[in-house]
Amino acid sequence: MAVINTRRMNPIFWIPPNTTTTYKLTVTRKDGTVDDITSLVRNFKINNGVTDGIGDFEAEVFNSGGEYSNKWTGMEVFMYYADYDSTATTLRFRGRIEKPSYKDYTIKISGRSESFFIMEKNVNKSYSSVDTAAILLDLVNAYGDGRYGVDLIPASSGKTISIKWVDRPFWDAVQDLCNASGYDCYVDENLKFRYFLGGSVINRGEGAVHDLNIVETGEYLNDTTTIKNKVRVYGATIDGVQVMYTVNDESSQADYEVREQKINDDSITTKEEAKELGDLNLSSLTANPQIGTVRVVMLASVQPGEKIFMSDPDNNLVPNYYKISGFTHTYDETSFFTDLEINQSQKTVSNLFKDNISNILRNTDTSANPFDMDFSYIETFDVDSGTHSSTQIAGGALKSTGASGTWLSGSIDSFDDRYLNYASLVIKGSDLSNVAVSISADGGTNYFTLSSSSKTQITSNYATSFIVKVVISSSTASVDSLSIQYTTTTI
């Protein structure tokens, strides 16, 4: 008996536009005069992207009669229109001229999208359990000077975070929100912030198809070079002890071995903030993206972050919808192309150096972690806490009220629901030879003495929380601050 496959197939067909792209370029002077430079453009290039960067442009314009000499001096508005029609009327890109230069009867202009006005701002904000969409709305309202529309920012992304930024570049803060939520963001041609779930916007009117409009397909592959699956965050040093937290993706570590990223950020002052920053970075660094570039005959309507249909089976592009993280329109005497970046831009060596430099610039303190611990609990004794037995907290220090005394902390959560297995001590104070610090992982039955010169294994009754005990055996001894640095295990 013949076997019949009854599974329904849903083939994808793309019907290309029946005309090529028509474009128009204009420059609006400071006095409001609009110069249509479409017929005078010798060449132009327009880049735009989502989340990882902002748009920019450059163009070379014939000026043989000197018509535009000294008319464009910088900050004029550059506009690019494109349509599949006899005339181009739909605005697709908007920027500001930053560098006009004159040479050989031409003017070369270049600049960035108008989002750069807000990119120049630094963010000083903190939020506790707030939806990322609400945070973005607040940031744009606080730093946008009323320049940008916010009606395309949704009421909720479904992801709440707690985060603090101190002098964080605005777009870095936006990228933090996108990393946390899985959303994409860019400022569109109408100066509106668009914030949408990554891959949720589909452009069904355009595509890239072999034997129709694809000119060239670059290498398309899985990129593992950027993967980091262990992120260790070093925060501020407070009273001589430092905030520290480590996040891991054990599934990724099993596939690619441990690949560590270190982040130093002195704006982090609590373990909760360090964990939030680590989680934000880990979510973006563990991705194994499929990347590539495709050159097509110039497209008219594509926008950053959209998914468009592509098909080039001979070059490993099976027919499907692919996310466009960025694109470049190029026109000159021989070119009329759009280069599409699939999913995300491949990291080059210069990108990697740039990331490294960024991390260095964020680091204004040296991290002290001689035993490669993952977490820290810090106590600065600035406020009264714990249980006292002939001890007191006064003047920002823990002291005995007599010849000796004992202080017990409350129960301290290890944070990641794993079990304490090694710990070491960082302590600041006076007459510390008469101070002993120990921890218990079984509610106070067994204590293990800690040292600043070695790490101590916690061997009895593994637990996901611990208690710190400080014994002061001299009336002259005091503890200004201490840090318990520790690691955890799943057993």
Image: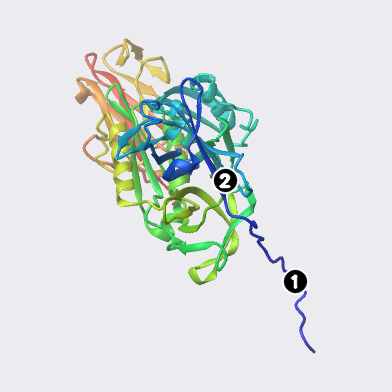
Q: Residue at x 21, y 23 (%)?
A: 432
Q: Nearer the viewer, residue 35 or 279?
A: 35
Q: From mark 2 to mark 1, how far is it between C-alphas?
A: 30 Å
Q: Quadrant of residue 322?
A: bottom right
* Front residue (pair 389, 68): 68
Examine the rendering and report whether any part of residue 461 can be seen. no
The disc at residue 130 is none
Within 10 Å of disc 2 (Cα), the crowding (few <14, some 14-19, many 20+) is: many
Residue 21 in sight from this viewpoint: yes
Q: Say above or below: 297 vs 186.
A: below
Residue type at mark 1: give it.
Arg
Residue 471 vs residue 44: left or right? Answer: left
Horizontal and vertical percent for residue 41?
A: 44, 43
| Colouring scheme, one of rainbow, by chain, secondary structure, one colour | rainbow
The residue indicated by pointer 1 is 7
Task: Please name the amino acid that badge 2 sits on.
Answer: Gly
Q: Nearer the viewer, residue 378 or 87?
A: 87
**Looking at the picture, does residue 61 appear above or below residue 479?**
below
Look at the image and tell me in which quarter the N terminus lies.
bottom right
Q: What residue do we see at 45% from left, 53% from top?
A: 250
Q: Which residue is mark 2?
A: 198
SS for tag 1? loop
Q: Which mark sits nearer the N-terminus, 2 or 1?
A: 1
